[in-house]
Image: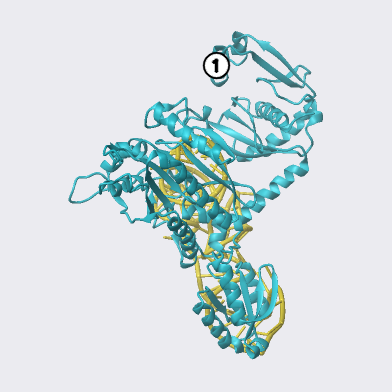
Chain colours: A cyan, B yellow
Amino acid sequence: MASLEEKRHTLAHLLAAAVKNLHPDALPTIGPAIDTGFYYDFDTNAIKEDSLPALQKEMEKLLPDWTEFTHKEVSAAEAREFFKGNTFKKELIEELEQKGEAITLYTSGRLPDGSQGFTDLCRGGHVENPAKNIAPGSFMLDKVAGAYWRGSEKNKMLTRVYGLAFDTKEELDAYLAQREEAKKRDHRKIAREQGLLVFSDLVGSGMPLFTPKGNIIRNEIIGLSRELNIELDFGEVHTPNVNKGELFKISGHYDKYKEDMLSVSSQYVDDEMFLKPMNCPQHTQIYAAFPRSYRDLPIRFSDFAVLYRDERPGELSGLTRLRSFSQDDGHIFCREDQIESEVSNVLAAIQKALKIYKIDYWMRFSLRDPNNKAKYLGSDEVWEKAQDIMRRLLLEKKINFKEAEGEAAFYGPKIDIMAVDAIGREWQISTVQLDFNMPGRFGLEYTAEDGSKKTPVMIHRALIGSPDRFMGMLIEHYAGAFPTWLAPVQVKVLSVSEKHSDYAQEVVAELKAAGIRAETDDSNETLGKKIRAGKTEKIPYLLVVGDKEVESKTVSVETRDGSLGTVAVADFIQRATEDIKARK
RNA sequence: GCCAGGGUAGCUUAGCUGGUUAAAGCAGCGGUUUUGUAAACCGCAGAGCGUGAGUUCGAACCUCACCCCUGGCUCCA
């Protein structure tokens, strides 16, 4: 039975064969199977987007001749001879040679003269009979993109051709349909349609301007985090946007992220200053400003300040990657014996928040990259200790998690919450990070029970990450149909005709007095059109008022899921208020 | 930053092998209508075709530079 991965990998070979026929100068490099199909990287600049149809055709033409794979093991010298002129393949051969692994060449297909077909350096993993095993219409070339050789931007950029491939044509079509669905939910599109935020070339890229409607959502998100912070006994602080470079030199951010910080200058003093890219160093200064006793710990600060990062232009994307954004940030300074309860309380709060937002998630335990320790601050012992504490905690709590090497922050390991949205895409949101490094660098201390001075531990955490980014995710998760508590307009009162405008205004006034975000649509349009507009805007409640309702002081309630009939205004207010309070 | 696409009215799009006043729908505005659960009718206005240079008798269309957006790569405290 041919596995999907084998099919995909086989298609990568087929693609390389097609490229070899149509673009003989393109040097093949590597071509693995991926989640949705396959890709192959070529050293060439001849392949553009519009080359794809011809390549696709060529692949389809070649496929019937690919009835088997033959392979042979060769010496490094033979392999080098075969791939002479291809420095990329030579580099791979050298590596195989050094590791003492077998070097194999795989061949499939046939040339017009009947001689052997396309041969590639490969360790295997193909379907036995591509012509038979690969269903017609189950694959398509998708797009062309640049990709650095071996994933390093120091290396040459190659041309990557992506292909989609599934077991059947139906599965490919389903994937394409799902991609269409994702496009419909695109937060950039919905944010524009609903007038939630805008960007301006004059303000700058990556710097969102929230409209009154968008800011309502943003504030509700912050409001929930603030409420959870109070339950967790955090004290909210307020800190400035501009900081001296010295602060970041001590924290270690200067060395690591100077290129990604926006600098600011003063006309009067020479200090190198930066817009702050994070809050942690500042919070250490609030801690440091007063003598602290073991009895005072844990000390917890929360902060919603706007942060600035000089992201490279090509990395910006809607609300998911911004130059200016905030975090629902918080830092805990505690004793070692308090780590466990602090981390588990924060995790519980995160879980509570995600339940309210109806978001599924999984946890990623992000560890240091053991092969690149230079990227991180602090000694091996400290890292081992921090990672052990966190792992033990996750195991004790019986939390399902996946370990991920190389995903830690530069100062410590972290637990990242990976949200899974309504159509299955993952977003990294919340985080809890254990830091044994920064407090020492800032000379933070507390007086222990025995009178000695000790260094506190610092826990960095964000409940939902960035309110701005999270809002982008929520837009896509809900496809713009926000639950009532988040909806910028919770209720819209539609008058049947202009005769009923006064009553509609009255109802809106009552709703507003009850704290409900309501407006009227008393435009000179038919009711049908107003309903349509309200539904398109995804307003949670549409209240229709006409002669009957004016007469009986009622409203006819239409929700996104259907009609609730005619109820007294007071009853509707009660119902809506309960929803909002319960964050439904 | 790098690779590949793209930028026409507030929005969605047409026009683009160079050739009169750049064409629609929605939204907007003005009328008519006074409407009962997903688009009433008529009219009006709205576009320096991303920006700046160039080629040409003539540029939305060709060339160059820059800006911005999209998809990747790299990065993500």
> Where A100 sits versus A498, above or below?
above
Q: Quadrant of the N terminus of chain A?
A: top right
Mark 1 lies on residue: A95
Q: Residue at x 54, y 84 (%)?
A: A505
Label 1: few (<14), some (14–19) or many (≥20) C-alpha neighbours in 10 Å: few
> Where A51 sits versus A117, above or below?
below
- Figure quadrant of residue A144: top right
Report whether residue A95 is seen: yes
Residue A260 on image: x %, y %: 37, 42
Report whether residue A274 is seen: no
- Figure quadrant of residue B44: bottom right
The residue positioned farthest toward the left in the image shown: A268
Residue A365 on image: x %, y %: 52, 37
Q: Secondary structure at mark 1?
A: helix
Left or right: residue A367 versus residue A280 is right
Under mark 1, the amino acid is Glu
Disc 1 sits on a residue from what chain? A
Residue A320 on image: x %, y %: 50, 50
